[in-house]
Image (tube, rainbow, N blue to C red):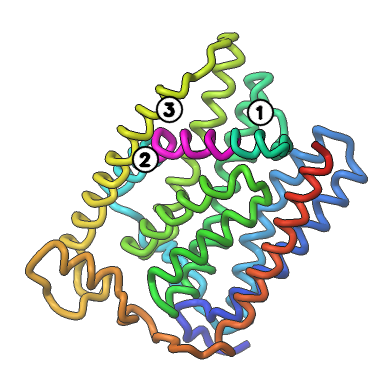
Amino acid sequence: MRPLVRQSFRPNTAGIVFCAVYLVVLVLSVVFTAAIPQPASQWCYAFVAPILYIVAVVSGGLMDGTDVVEALGVKRAPRAWQAGLTVALAVACVVAFLPIATGVQRLFDLMGYHATPSYADYSSSWGNMILGLVGLALLPALGEEVLCRGMMFGALKQKGTVYGMMISALLFALWHGSPVQLVHQFLIGVVMAVLVHFTRTVWTSVIFHFCNNALVIVYEFVYKEARWTYTIEWWVYLIMFAVGLPLVLALLYVFIRGTVRRAERGVLTLAKAPETAKERVRHALDVHGEYVPYIRGNVQETIAVYAAFGLVMILWFINTISGWVAS
C-alpha cells in the first residue's frame, strides 16, 4: 500500500466513492424491502447504510493514499464554545428553515405531488423514539457527514471554497431523493460546510446534524404522546422565518469571527494577519485557494464529481416523477 501522504481527498476519488456508495445503498434498500417485512426493513436500512458510508470513505481514502484521519479532522475536537454555538445554530436553523420546507411542501401539494419520504416509525413508543435517536439521528449524522462534508466538501473546496460548499450541499440535498426536502437540505448543507471549513473538523457538522434530526424526532414523539392537534398558521411561519434567519446569520457571524480570531497559525490558513473582521473572514474563506492546491479549470481532475452529480440528479428526477405518478 502506498504511504499516506495526501491530507485531503482528491475530487475524482471522492466522486467515485460517492457514486459507488450511492448505488450500493440503492441496491441495499431494494434487497431489504424485498427480503424483510416492514418496519424491520426500514430499521435495518437506517442502521446499516450510515456504517457503509463510513466504510466506503475510509476504504476509498486508504486505497488512494489519503490520510483519512487528517482529511476528516477527527483528532481536532471543537472547543466547548464552538460546540455550544453549533447546538444553538441547529435550533435556529430549524426555526428559520421550517417555514421554507413547509412552503415547498405546500407548493408541491398544489402541483399534485403528495409523496413523502419513508422512514421507520420513531414516534409510536419510547422504545422507537430511542431507536430513532440512534438510527435516524446519531448514525446518519456520522455517516452522512463523513461522506458529504468530510470527503466531498474536503475534495471540492480544492476548486474553491464557495464552490465546494455549494456543490457538496447540492449533492447532499439530491442524495435524500425527495423534492420536498431539496431546499431545506441544501440550506443546512451549506451551513454545515461553513462549520467544517472554519473548524477543519467534521465533528462540528456531526453535532449540528444530530441536533437537527433529534429535534424533529423528539418533537414528533411529544406531539403524538401529548395528542396535540393544532395547526401552525401561516403568520406563525412568517414570524419564525423573520426571527430565525437573522438569528442564524448572527450565530454564524459569531462562530466565524470567534474561530478566526482564536485560530493559531497553521490551524486556519491566513494569507496574512488581517486587521479587520471582514478581512479575516475573507482570508479564512480562502477564496483564492490558499487552503489547499487550487484546481484551475482542469476538468479531468473533477470528472468523477460531475458523474456523481449526474447520477444523483437523474435518480432524483426519477423519484420525483414516480412520486407524481403515484400521487
Q: Report whether 128 appears left or right of 212.
A: right
User: 251 or 57: nearer the eye?
Assistant: 251
- The secondary structure that dominates the magenta segment is helix
Foreground tag (3 vs 2): 3
Residue 88 sits in quarter? top left
Q: Secondary structure at mark 3?
A: helix
Is residue 316 shown above or below 118?
Answer: below
Tell me what residue is drawn at x 61 percent, y 68 percent: 57
Quarter containing the N terminus: bottom right
- What's the magenta region? 93-105
Neighbourhood count class around disc 1 (C-alpha, 10 Å): few under 14, some 14–19, many 20 upward:
many
For the residue marked with disc 2, what is the amino acid?
Answer: Val
Please give the residue where the numbered disc 1 appears in the rendered image: 122
| C-alpha separation, residue under disc 2 versus residue under disc 1 | 22 Å
Please give the residue where the numbered disc 2 appears in the rendered image: 87
Quarter containing the C terminus: top right
Q: Earlier in the sequence, mark 1 or mark 3?
A: 1
Residue 147 sits in quarter? bottom right
Q: Secondary structure at mark 1?
A: loop
Please give the residue where the numbered disc 3 appears in the rendered image: 237
Q: Secondary structure at mark 2?
A: helix
User: 299 or 217: nearer the eye?
Assistant: 299
Is residue 304 shown above or below 186?
Answer: below
The outermost residue toward the left is 275
Q: Earlier in the sequence, mark 2 or mark 1?
A: 2
